[in-house]
Image: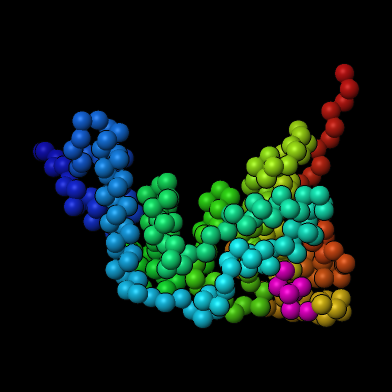
Amino acid sequence: MTSTTPTVAEEIARYLQTGDTDSYHAAWSAPSFLERAQRAGADLENALVAEVSRRANGWQPPPALEAVEDLVAFTRGKTEPMVRGLFPRAEHDAVMMLVEKSVVFLTPSNIEKVLREEQWPRSAWDLANLYLGAIGADLLANDAPQILGISEETTCYVSPAYFEEDDPFADYVVHEVAHIFHNCKRRNAGLRETRRREWLLDIDFRKRETFAYACEANACVLRQVTKPAERVALAAELRDSFGTGDARVEPSEVAEIVRSAAARRNGWKVILERCAAPKRPRASPA
């Protein structure tokens, strides 16, 4: 029984349909593996960009997205209250600079650049489906997930569907930026790092999703009302309406944390205290 090496056209079709690629790039002919990889990467990338453009078919962004003149300023407006509440004053600017560079909104003007700059073919394929799903176009695969964004390391890719979200306690940008704080080391933000302070925030591994959901809901509460009594009343509504469908969190715990945060002047500290990793004991002197 003999196996037949697929053609370049067949490998491109397989990639567009599944996101899978041949790690050996056997369909491409070149003197070395490196050259085969380069040719394969270029062909797959070009095919993906062309297919996304074809399916998008001149799609125009929703009015809410078109109304945003400066997406960096928009990101700052969404996340700055959280940064100011969780970090000391001396670290605000450094953390905000990191956040502003970490959030990427997918739009008709940047989708090609984003796809071409993505290092991994599978990740580019996922981003393509994220974008196509958000604009109502046919996905590359019927089982591609319907989500508002994708996070990779310290970068959050946000779909245009974000601007049509109507849940009063939902904000994908705040949620994913909250995850950056425990995924990013202090030195990557230009801050001093020590043996006991390695990460921007030391969040208990078991509480990371709880932390992100609590930050998300708290940001929404603060955005809608200003008086303490109003914040507490709105946070109480979360207890009846909040449901993540996420097995990693207990909705009642998130609701209780947000209610407690609403009653405090700086509720962000309440969230941090409830989700922080246990303090490590100091080493005993020899």
Q: Position of residue 32 (x, y in %)?
A: 25, 30
Please identify the quarter of the rendering in which residue 41 is found: top left
Q: Is residue 198 magenta?
A: no
Q: Position of residue 152 (x, y in %)?
A: 53, 51
Residue 250 seen from this side: no
Residue 153 seen from this side: yes
Q: Work out whether 280 lies above or below 211.
A: above
Task: Please report the residue visible at 49 percent of the width from the left and 67 percent of the height from the top.
Answer: 159
| Numbered range of the magenta stretch | 219-225
Horizontal relation, residue 284 to residue 154: left or right: right
Task: Please report the residue visible at 57 percent of the width from the left and 72 percent of the height from the top.
Answer: 69
Task: Please report the residue visible at 23 percent of the width from the left and 56 percent of the height from the top.
Answer: 13
Horizontal relation, residue 185 to residue 139: left or right: right
Horizontal relation, residue 273 to residue 223: left or right: right
Q: How many marks?
A: 0
Q: Work out whether 44 lies above or below 252.
A: above
> Please, which residue is most extreme toward the top here?
286
Please identify the quarter of the rendering in which residue 264 is found: bottom right
